[in-house]
């Protein structure tokens, strides 16, 4: 039994080794390790039947004599000598140590992929860092090169430098310029004008690490010592971005000479309430025309204007000069009176320039002058008795009251008061002076202690009054169009030998100037006619019931001495009167409301002398009436009362006059008479 078992075992071992020999000989390799790899079998392995025949063939006992590929698993090698087949099999089944060639290959592939990823990430971070540091806005600069002082009217040139210190290109570069209207660009070929205070220069692209420049030429028009700023802004888009960016800079230029001469003259000292005269001189110093010139005056507080030559264009403080040619000039004389406390400075500010495009006044020259209020020891003043305003009318009696007072601390001897009155509209033949003397050759009234004993010694803090009166002419003399805007001027003074004279100063004598303005005499009249050369009337005269008779109404305006503005006449037709629509002249602005029967004549502005130097301003319109039976023996109403309104431009006073009601009793028409103005049947 034992021998039989050994044979069986031996045969099994021989079969096992035959199988291995066949597998090695046919290049069949089985690889098994701790990682689950696939089994690779050669595609040319023999079929199973051939394998069995060779395995159990009686001629296949000599396994060792067969050839096969060398392997460490080959039982013929000496590495397994001395081991039993079971020990050798156990040895073959042990896991391999280290990495196989395929594992090493895959490891290298993994390492390579990892390195590529690391390099890609590093490259991305580097690219982003490069982009971030390739451009900085503060590496773009703009600067001005040019004089920081300039004379007005002289051409000036400035160089605008721009620099790009980045590693990227600046796209669509533009330089936006802004300045006040005191600077006017001239002769700039590449400059695009946007407005009076803005322009633009197109540059294009600016390459990395490069710079360039542009020119700006122009002329300054500004007062002396006036700062003018030229501002520039470079706008661009970096090639590595999409947002528009900008950098800016500016240069300040101080003006050393004005383009237009402007001078202001006024007394250094005046007494409170005294008259004051300002004289403004101007002249264009440029070789070019200065257009749309205006002069604006800021008067001191307490100043009241009485007149100006020429007349102010607006707000009693604006004068529109217009265009000033080279070396052309002019003068403005302003008169008035000023009030203030002792030692108070009164400043007048005069500006010359033009109105800019943004409705702001652009100043070319500016002057300021101070007049100081002084308090004389002997003070004198004037006023009209019973009148607060400085406006008088034709035929009015002017009652002057001259007051005086010693404001010092000592008595003053032998005071003399004088009053000088000037005007062509006063009737000096009727002047009346109380306790004084009038010298007609000098138009001078004088009061002395011989006539007024109180003037012999005027004690401190005491005073008194003297009087005179003079009428305004009833008929104002108008000979030409220049006879208008009449002013009555009077100057009162008081003096004493005891008034001290300060060192290096003139003796301050108390004085006071009073100016009165004559309001224009306006005459408004309403008349009616049946017989008329302007519009032909019809119908029975005397009037008969049931038959219409037409009449014409005349509105007339006479204006004597001042221009008047906004003249208007308003009235209405009574019920029963009909508006025919006939008007003469046809170009007059007259309207009729059929629902209210109201008539409005818009006469507008009427110059002084209308109706005196030429014909009155007149409008004629026609009205028709149809008498009824209950109106027999009575006149018929044609027009209600008429109201005339206007504004006197010289005295700044409104005018209101009333015209009488009109009926068919038209005494101004001789064809009507007393009897023909009533309904007869």
Image (tube, grey):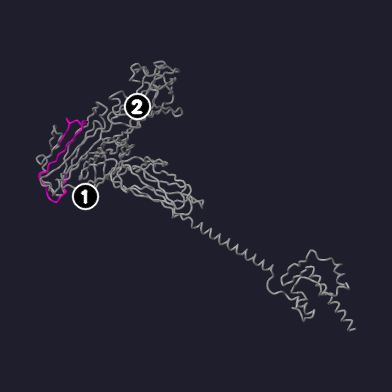
Left or right of residue 150: residue 372: left
Which residue, given by chain and number where applicable, does mark 1 sit on? Answer: 343
The percent position of residue 70, horizontal first and vertical second, equals 75, 72
* Image vertical order of residue 98 relative to residue 152, above or below: below
Q: Give the range drawn in magenta.
A: 404-433
* Image vertical order of residue 365 relative to residue 130, above or below: above
Question: Which quarter of the picture shows residue 52?
Answer: bottom right
Total marks drawn? 2
Q: Which one is closest to the eye, mark 1 or mark 2?
A: 1
Question: Which quarter of the picture shows residue 60?
Answer: bottom right
Which residue sits at x=76%, y=79%?
Answer: 80
Which residue, given by chain and number where applicable, does mark 2 sit on? Answer: 660
* Image vertical order of residue 662 relative to residue 62, above or below: above
Q: Looking at the image, which residue sits at the far bottom?
A: 2
Which residue sits at x=34%, y=28%?
Answer: 659
How crowded is the residue under tag 2: few (<14 C-alpha within 10 Å), some, or many (20+)?
A: some
Q: In which quarter of the image is the N terminus?
A: bottom right
The percent position of residue 379, horizontal first and vertical second, equals 17, 45
Q: Name the secondary structure under disc 1.
A: loop
The percent position of residue 195, horizontal first and vertical second, equals 41, 41
**326 and 667: which one is in front?**
326
Q: Name the secondary structure under disc 2.
A: loop
Left or right of residue 360: residue 368: left
Cα gap from disc 1 to disc 2, whole angstroms: 56 Å
Does the magenta run of residues contain 517?
no
């Amino acid at each position: 039994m034992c021998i039989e078992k050994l044979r069986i075992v031996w045969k099994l071992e021989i079969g096992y080794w035959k199988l291995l020999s066949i597998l090695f000989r046919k290049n069949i390799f089985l690889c098994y390790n701790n990682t689950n790899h696939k089994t690779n079998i050669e595609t040319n392995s023999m079929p199973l039947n051939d394998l069995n025949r060779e395995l159990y063939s009686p001629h296949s006992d000599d396994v060792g004599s067969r050839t096969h590929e060398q392997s460490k698993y080959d039982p013929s090698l000496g590495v397994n000598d001395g081991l039993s087949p079971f020990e050798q099999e156990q040895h073959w089944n042990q896991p391999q140590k280290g990495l196989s060639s395929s594992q090493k290959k895959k490891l290298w592939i993994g390492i390579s992929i990892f390195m590529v990823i690391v390099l890609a990430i590093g490259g991305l971070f580097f690219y982003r860092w490069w982009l971030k540091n390739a451009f900085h806005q503060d590496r773009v600069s703009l600067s001005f090169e040019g004089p920081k002082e300039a004379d007005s009217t002289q051409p000036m040139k400035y160089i605008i430098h721009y620099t790009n210190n980045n590693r990227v290109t600046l796209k669509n570069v533009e330089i936006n310029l802004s300045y006040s209207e005191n600077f006017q660009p001239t002769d700039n070929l590449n400059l695009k004008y946007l407005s009076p205070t803005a322009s633009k220069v197109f540059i294009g692209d600016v390459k990395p690490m490069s710079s360039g420049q542009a020119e700006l030429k122009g002329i300054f028009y500004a007062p002396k010592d006036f700062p003018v700023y030229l501002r520039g802004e470079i706008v661009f888009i970096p090639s590595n971005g999409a947002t528009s960016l900008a950098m800016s800079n500016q240069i300040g230029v101080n003006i050393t000479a004005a383009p237009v001469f402007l001078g202001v003259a006024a007394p250094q000292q005046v007494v409170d309430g005294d008259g004051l005269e300002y004289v403004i001189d101007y002249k264009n110093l440029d070789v070019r025309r200065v257009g749309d010139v205006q002069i604006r005056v800021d008067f001191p507080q307490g100043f009241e204007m009485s007149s100006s030559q020429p007349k102010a264009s607006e707000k009693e403080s604006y004068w529109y000069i217009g265009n000033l040619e080279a070396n052309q000039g002019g003068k403005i004389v302003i008169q008035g009176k000023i009030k203030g406390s002792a030692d108070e400075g009164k400043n007048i500010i005069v500006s010359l320039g033009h109105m800019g495009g943004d409705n702001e006044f652009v100043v070319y020259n500016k002057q300021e002058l101070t007049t100081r209020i002084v308090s004389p020891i002997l003070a004198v003043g004037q006023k009209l008795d019973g009148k607060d305003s400085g406006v008088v009318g034709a035929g009015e009696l002017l009652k002057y009251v001259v007051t005086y007072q010693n404001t010092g601390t000592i008595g003053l001897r032998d005071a003399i008061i004088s009053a000088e009155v000037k005007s062509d509209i006063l009737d000096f033949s009727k002047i009346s002076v109380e306790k004084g003397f009038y010298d007609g050759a000098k138009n001078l009234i004088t009061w002395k202690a011989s006539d007024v004993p109180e003037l012999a010694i005027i004690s401190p803090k005491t005073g008194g009054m003297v009087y005179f009166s003079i009428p305004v002419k009833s008929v104002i003399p108008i000979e030409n169009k220049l006879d208008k805007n009449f002013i009555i001027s009077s100057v009162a003074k008081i003096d004493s030998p005891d008034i001290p004279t300060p060192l290096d100063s003139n003796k301050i004598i108390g004085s006071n100037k009073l100016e009165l303005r004559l309001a224009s005499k306006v005459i408004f009249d309403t008349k009616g006619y049946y017989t008329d050369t302007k519009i032909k009337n019809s119908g029975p005269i005397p009037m008969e019931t049931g038959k219409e008779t037409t009449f014409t109404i005349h509105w007339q305006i006479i204006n004597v001495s001042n221009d008047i503005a906004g003249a208007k006449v308003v009235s209405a037709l009574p019920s029963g009167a009909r508006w025919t629509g006939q008007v003469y002249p046809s170009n007059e602005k007259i309207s009729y409301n059929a629902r209210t029967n109201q008539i409005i004549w818009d006469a507008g502005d009427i110059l002084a002398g209308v109706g005196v130097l030429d014909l009155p301003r007149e409008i004629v319109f026609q009205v028709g009436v149809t008498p009824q039976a209950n109106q027999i023996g009575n006149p018929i109403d044609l027009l209600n009362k008429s109201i005339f309104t206007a504004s006197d431009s010289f005295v700044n006073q409104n005018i209101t006059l009333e015209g009488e009601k009109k009926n068919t009793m038209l005494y101004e028409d001789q064809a009507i008479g007393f009897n023909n103005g009533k309904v007869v049947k």
